[in-house]
């Protein structure tokens, strides 16, 4: 393994931050120079803080073709998402969800992990990462070989019965939707893709949808995810906080951290006096808590970082 020079963390100095509107130098050469600098900084962090907790958000799956929620300024890019209370209380919202999900699910199902997922899985395998907490529901960390992964907001490949609590495979529900609504095949695709297997679908299509029901008891079905307005189970939060208590530092990758469920871990790490490192091209809610902010794209940055450990 390459001996990486022990270097103190850069001091937090807002005047040293690059412009948010133009975070990267314009030429490829300058981009690569910055990438190498960021990779060395990150490699030093990994070497000097041997127990890491990593928090990931939608940005890490963007290179896998899954849309993100926000732009680089942290502005919400989509119409209002489905809220948990609305889903629970009316069939129209459920029709809207399942119609949108029918079109959007294949994108999630067919997405493949990208280099950022693979490098994090490798660092976990080498003992550098204790826990990966992901706000994503796409299971790409696990498909890249990650084992110690908490799906903070659940997983989109499962569907839960709201009555008997049985879990169904999402693909089986896709087939059920297809059988009950064969006319969906004739609806042209090309709707605007949204995060988490969601897709813009005209209202008249969703209102015509026959809702899928539980194979076991006929109850209402819900994806096994935490909708907006819903809560992360307390036991899940406790697992993450316990890991953070034992960790040396927290690295947040590809998240604007606008949602409290992820932001709380940055706040906790900061309260505990542990370094918070942010890898994100745009602004985040936790920028003021971060000792280090790296704006190179996660896939190339993590790949270059790993090379520092492999070239020795
Ligand atoms: Zn059921």
Image: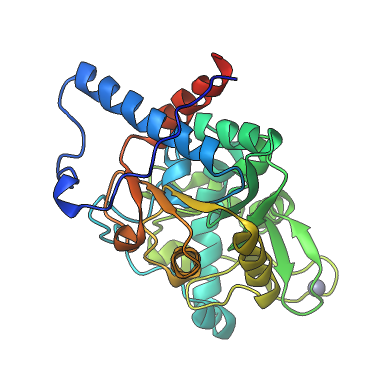
- The image quadrant where one finds ligand 1 is bottom right
Counting the numbered discs, the total is 0
Q: Is residue 112 visible?
A: no
Which residue lies at the image location 70% right of the left edge and 62% below the top edge? 159
Nearest the camera: 55 or 144? 55
Instruction: Say if 56 sits above or below 140 in the image.
Output: below
- In percent of width and height, residue 284 lies at 31, 58
What residue appears at the point 36 percent right and 65 percent down from the top-left corner?
Answer: 258
Residue sitting nearer the eye, 206 or 121: 121
Position of the C terminus, as image quadrant, is top right
What residue is shown at x 41% (from left), y 66% (from top)? Answer: 204
**Quadrant (top left/top right/bottom left/bottom right) for the N terminus:** top right
Q: Position of residue 65 (x, y in %)?
A: 45, 37
Q: Position of residue 50 (x, y in %)?
A: 60, 42
Closer to us: 30 or 194 = 30
Residue 309 appears anywhere in the view: yes
Tell me residue 144's x, y (percent): 64, 34
Q: Is residue 84 left or right of residue 214?
A: left
In this rendering, the answer to whether 3 lies above or below 198 is: above
Res. 77 image quadrant: bottom left
- Direction from residue 152 to residue 239 in the image, left or right: right
Outermost right residue: 216
- Rendered position, 218 above or below 277: below
């Amino acid at each position: 393994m390459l001996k990486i020079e022990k270097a103190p963390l850069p001091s937090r100095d807002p005047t040293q931050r690059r412009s948010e509107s133009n975070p990267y130098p314009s030429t490829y050469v300058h981009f690569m120079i910055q990438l190498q600098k960021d990779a060395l900084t990150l490699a030093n962090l990994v070497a000097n803080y041997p127990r890491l907790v990593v928090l990931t958000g939608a940005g890490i799956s963007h290179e896998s073709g899954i849309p993100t929620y926000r732009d680089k300024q942290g502005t919400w890019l989509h119409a209002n998402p489905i809220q948990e209370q609305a889903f629970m209380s009316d069939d129209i919202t459920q029709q809207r969800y399942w119609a949108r999900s029918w079109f959007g699910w294949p994108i999630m199902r067919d997405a493949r992990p990208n280099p950022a997922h693979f490098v994090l899985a490798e660092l976990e395998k080498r003992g550098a990462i204790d826990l990966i907490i992901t706000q994503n529901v796409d299971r790409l960390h696990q498909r890249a070989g990650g084992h110690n992964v908490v799906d903070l907001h659940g997983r989109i490949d499962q569907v839960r019965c709201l009555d008997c609590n049985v879990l169904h495979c999402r693909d089986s529900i896709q087939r059920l939707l297809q059988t009950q609504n064969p006319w969906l095949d004739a609806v042209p695709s090309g709707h605007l893709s949204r995060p988490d297997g969601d897709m813009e679908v005209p209202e008249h299509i969703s209102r015509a949808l026959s809702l899928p029901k539980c194979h076991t008891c006929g109850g209402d079905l819900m994806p096994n995810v935490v909708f907006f307005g819903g809560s992360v189970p307390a036991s899940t939060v406790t697992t993450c906080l316990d890991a953070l208590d034992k960790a040396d530092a927290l690295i947040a990758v590809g998240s604007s951290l606008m949602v409290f469920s992820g932001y709380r871990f940055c706040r906790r790490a900061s309260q505990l006096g542990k370094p918070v490192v942010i890898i994100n091209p745009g602004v985040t809610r936790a920028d003021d808590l971060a000792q280090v902010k790296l704006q190179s794209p996660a896939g190339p940055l993590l790949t270059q970082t790993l090379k520092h450990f492999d070239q020795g």
